[in-house]
Image: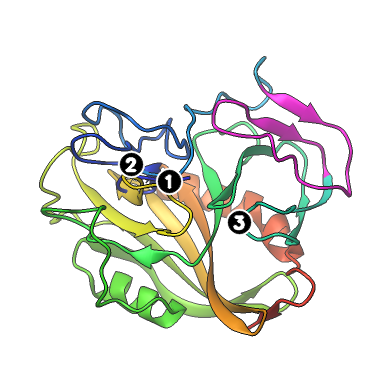
Amino acid sequence: MPSGTGSMVGKCVPRLGWLATRAGRRTIAPLLLLLLLPACQGSGSGGSPSPPAGSPSAQSVTTTGDAMPGSCSGDSPTQVSPGTYRLDEGTVLPGLTVTVPSGWTCAENLPGQFSMSPPGDPNEAMLFWVDMVAVKSSGAGHGETILKSVGKTPSALVSWLVHNRDFAIGSRPRSTTVGQRIPMTSLVVGVSPSVDYGDHCPAAHNRCADMFVNPRTWTTGNWYGMGGRTEDRLYIGTIHMHGRPHSFLIDLDAEDMAHLIRLESAAQPILGSLTLPTGTVAG
């Protein structure tokens, strides 16, 4: 999962924490040293930067129409064969069904985050989250401080992002749908050139800003943030499970706008295939 700042799990993080970088954006391993990499992010499980799809350490899944492999992680990515998969128990949204095109790699399938990387580009990520909350984006206590003044609903999270001067809005919020008629609000977010992060933003990034954490499933010291020229396409909506509302987020995390455009194109078949678990209602 993410932790740190920027479009990274464990991205820019202060003191002992998670560090988000382009190569380790989606990793969940804690860093007991200062940030050395580009983007910042944090997460709640352990791991290391994901090797490229097809590398010797990448597993291969040959069975389709089954559970998404639960063994994939930052240090054990899984190259997924084309087909339709469901998220199993103990994952971010058990029962969610996704159809995966050829060449995608599963980087994490955990209670706090499900993430995949597109063909040939392990440094980009498609992330799935539930019930994220806003954290202080810069200054003292960034990343570690949950903003209790910001609501947990999609509209509250979107409003916070749009009105927070630490973020640059590359595409204004718009209503859309993904998958089987799942209403979402979508926007593109980057890091503002004027942000005053405070400490431990890698020199290579030049600027960092923290975004979200899941206090229920992510361990202390982990959060998600952005750094440098990172651009994220966010989809934020509401789903009802067992009669209770939950925020459902999808994040396309890219190195810059050019990479984001390519990632958006590659991710469209997956976004269009999403089917919520039985008994879960969108909106």
For mark 1, what is the residue? 2
In terms of image quadrants, where is residue 13?
top left
Q: Earlier in the sequence, mark 3 or mark 2?
A: 2
Q: Which of the pair 227/222 is nearer the observer?
A: 222
Question: Residue 139 lies in magenta, yes or no?
Answer: no
Identify which amino acid the numbered label 1 is placed on.
Pro
Identify which amino acid the numbered label 3 is placed on.
Val
For mark 2, what is the residue? 11
Q: Label 3's element?
A: loop
Q: Earlier in the sequence, mark 1 or mark 3?
A: 1
Q: Say which of marks 3 and 2 sits in front.
A: 3
Q: Which residues are magenta?
A: 58-82
Tell me if 209 is positioned left or right of 18 in this view.
left
> Which residue is drawn at the image coordinates 40% and 47% (left, top)?
219
Q: Which of the pair 24/66 is nearer the observer?
A: 66
Rounded to the nearest angstrom, the CA distance separating label 2 from label 1 is 7 Å
The answer to whether 36 is drawn above or below residue 206 in the figure is: above
> Which residue is drawn at the image coordinates 62% and 26% (left, top)?
76
